[in-house]
Image (cartoon, helix red, strand yellow):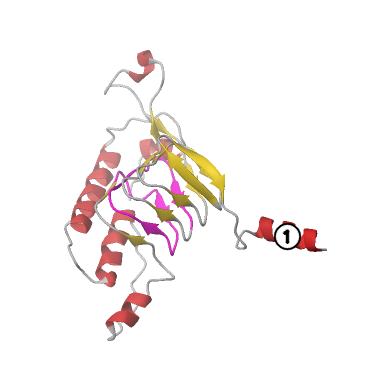
Amino acid sequence: MATSKEWRKMLNGELYWAWDADLQANRERCKEACKKFNEAGPVSRRRRVELWRDIIGDTRPLPPVNSDPQADEDLFKDTDPLVDGPISVDHGLNFKVGKGTFINFDLTVLDTCLVTIGERVLFGPHVRIYGATHPMDPAVRRGLEGPEAGKEIHIEDDVWVGGSVIILAGDVPPFHFVAGNPARVIRKIESSMDPLQAKEVSETAT
């Protein structure tokens, strides 16, 4: 687990030194975990979850094995997302994904700061999530010699993210369809699941 001063500065969105030994060690850990996930091939849902949790540093114990393969697979419906490889994540420890979410193939995540994805979110293929930033002033940036920074990204519940979208720092509100490069909110999704819309319908009916 990364704990250095530069790690804390990075998480806080401050300028930090990216070549800090603690940060580099965690990047290598995450890179190796992604490699194992991507090269696993056709494995059970249990094994896929185990490999996924290694990427994000989730140390929760897996539930006891059920002898029925389908029942064993169902154990993870309410605990973990469904992730299709290949996947590339920078740190992993700053990447939080809700249950019931589907991540399609070829996702890249730069989780310099916290990146959260809510529950029941659907991702198209080739999505890019970039939480990393650099100083605009080249005198401060100084190529590989200068500091970096980042901003948090939050994608709320029940969002649909279209294929090949690039998401930069900021929030994607719940019940919205997002597409484009860089991503933008296309429209709000009308749904009875949305408590605000349900309230409006109720008030209209009365």
Residue 4 place in picture, x, y as percent? 35, 40
Residue 184 place in picture, x, y as percent? 49, 38
The secondary element bearing badge 1 is classed as: helix
How many labels sit on residues? 1
Whether the magenta-drawn stretch holds residue 179 is answered as no
Determine if residue 64 is in view: no
Which quarter of the picture shows residue 144?
Answer: top left
Residue 60 place in picture, x, y as percent? 37, 67
Q: Is residue 113 above or below residue 36?
A: above
Q: Residue at x 16, y 57 (%)?
A: 39
Q: Is residue 162 above or below residue 200?
A: above
Q: Is residue 168 above or below residue 54?
A: above
Query: In this view of the protein, which residue sits in the foreground, 185 or 27?
Result: 185
The region drawn magenta spans 89-118
Determine if residue 137 is in view: yes
Whether the magenta-drawn stretch holds residue 110 is answered as yes
Q: Residue at x 45, y 31 (%)?
A: 14
Q: Residue at x 32, y 49 (%)?
A: 125
Which quarter of the picture shows residue 72?
Answer: bottom left
Residue furthest to the top in view is 139
Query: In this view of the protein, which residue sits in the foreground, 107 or 52?
Result: 107
Residue 75 place in picture, x, y as percent? 37, 76
The quadrant of the image that shows the C terminus is bottom right
Q: Residue at x 41, y 28 (%)?
A: 15
Q: Amino acid at mark 1?
A: Val
Which residue bears the numbered disc 1?
Answer: 201
Is disc 1 surrounded by few (<14), some (14 to 19) or many (20+) residues within 10 Å?
A: few
**In-image side of 119 versus 93 (left or right):** right
Residue furthest to the bottom in view is 67
